[in-house]
Amino acid sequence: MPKCVIDGREVEFAPGENLVEVAKRAGVNIPVFCYHPGLSVVAQCRMCAVEIEKMPKLQTACSTAATEGMAVKTQSERAIKNQKSIMEFLLLNHPLDCPICDKSGECDLQDQSYDYGSPYSRMTEEKRTYIDLDMGPVIVKNMNRCIHCTRCIRYGEQIAGIHEMVAIRRGNDTEITTIDGKPLQTAYAGNYADICPTGSLTLKDFRFKKRVWLLKRTATVCEGCARGCAMEAHAENNIVYRCVARENLEVNQYWLCDEGRFNFHYLHETDRVVEPAISSASGLVITEWKAAVDAAKATLKGRKALALIGSDLTQEEAKDIQEFIGKSFPGAPLLHFGTPGIHSAREDADEDKILKRKSKTSNLHGFEKLGLKGFESVPSGTEAVIVFRGGRAMLPKLPTLPTVGVGVFKKQEADKFATVLPGAAFAEKSGTIVNFQGREQKLVRAILPPGKSKALSEILMIWSHA
Ligand code: SF4
Ligand code: SF4
Ligand code: FES
């Protein structure tokens, strides 16, 4: 492998790699604003300029490929002077509103102003201000904070596949906006907030809910479809406040769709059944675990049962259920469900040209590896049903039969069930799921199951010993 030298450290590089990435591997941080590894390089902000031996002018590290023997200085007098000048330039019009800005604590501009900026401003003119236009349901815009890095424009064109962000006017009056001020159209709008290096584009759903440094970050996987995008769940006090994309170049690169990003809300909905419940004349009533399990057993006893399993459950859960059904209900069919119209992995396909898959559950492909077959209709002679579900799989239409629900259900879904044994949803457990590429990925528990809900393995243990 060819080698170059960055701040005196020798480092190998792959041909074509830019200096920002090569320096990162050598443990040297080159500050950037406009550069993002998932977008085209425009070398616009000039923050990353470095000194390269034998080159008369500073060069932008994001747009310069490393070459054999190249000697780079990121901390030379000229490089430092440039960093300070760029910071002063970018902060000329920037309001002093970090304390009330939602990006505070994870803002590149804030972090780099500590490292490279001056505590004093020489600006005596009035700062420019903008009236903000609504950007639709996902993003809030505050153009006073924008540094015109154009990441958002490039993201729209190059990843979301829609030219909806533009820069209008020039110089001091430049403004980033949507074409004709229309709301954002893409179904991948949340990524605008992730990639904006300042608090100019923030999530309507999250802003002012929590300061980011209070959040515990758990690296997990989205359960929204068969792709299984890498994501982080951010939680405090057993509440998930947001999910953000995590880099996985083979699966989702740096992105999430909005459906997956905001899917977590059902975890905390007030109509979720979080205590064991049995049916009564006035609907479901809450009871103790033992009473509920006894009622579930009584419902199924002596009846020819059908077992349904949501393909939103993990491989470990599916194996436990296979064993449980084999022992407790020998001969009962065990069939998976999850997305209307998709009964097997063969029917799953790309839903768009970006990330989304047609299967709206995360583990359809894993279930087929376990030999499970898809549910299409209720076998004749069925007298009772037991349904296992993680929360995301869509319940199929079932005839009115005595039914036991194990897992995550809304009150209105479970209203006609004989018994509900409440379980854990995707952020409340750890386990393995298999995506459409056949990759085994790990769900990691970010919070505990709410109320009296329990992990499936615990529920099955109570059942076996009750
Ligand atoms: S809105 Fe954010 S991402 Fe877009 S140009 Fe301004 S600072 Fe960059
Ligand atoms: S594409 Fe699928 S896995 Fe990825 S974020 Fe969207 S719903 Fe989640
Ligand atoms: S990061 Fe290199 S010019 Fe902006």
Image: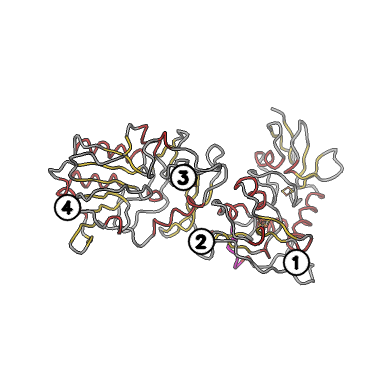
Task: Give yes or no for contact between labels 3 and 1 (Cβ–Cβ under 8 Å).
Answer: no
Residue 27 coordinates in the image, percent (x, y):
65, 42
Residue at the farthest right position:
56
Residue 288 part of the magenta-drawn span: no
Tell me if mark 1 has few (under 14), some (14-19) or many (20+) residues whose alpha carbon lies within 10 angstroms of its own: few
Write down the quadrant of residue 311 in the picture.
top left
* Residue 234 vertical position relative to residue 13 in the rendered view, above or below: below
Task: Give yes or no for contact between labels 2 and 4 (Cβ–Cβ under 8 Å).
Answer: no
Label 3 C-beta lies within 8 Å of the nearest ligand 2 atom: yes
SS of the residue at dot 1?
loop
For residue 205, which numbered disc appears in the image?
2
SS of the residue at dot 2?
loop
Q: Compare marks 2 and 4 and give the one earlier in the sequence.
A: 2
Q: Nearer the viewer, mark 3 or mark 1?
A: 3
Q: What residue type is labelled 3?
A: Val
For residue 120, which numbered disc appears in the image?
1
Q: Which amino acid does label 2 sit on?
A: Asp
Q: Name the residue under label 3.
A: 221
What residue is rendered at 20% in x and 46% in y? 463
What residue is rendered at 50% in x and 39% in y? 350
What residue is rendered at 16% in x and 51% in y? 294
Q: Name the residue under label 4.
A: 295
Q: Compare marks 4 and 3 and give the one earlier in the sequence.
A: 3
The answer for how far apart the CA atoms under marks 1 and 2 are is: 35 Å
SS of the residue at dot 4?
helix
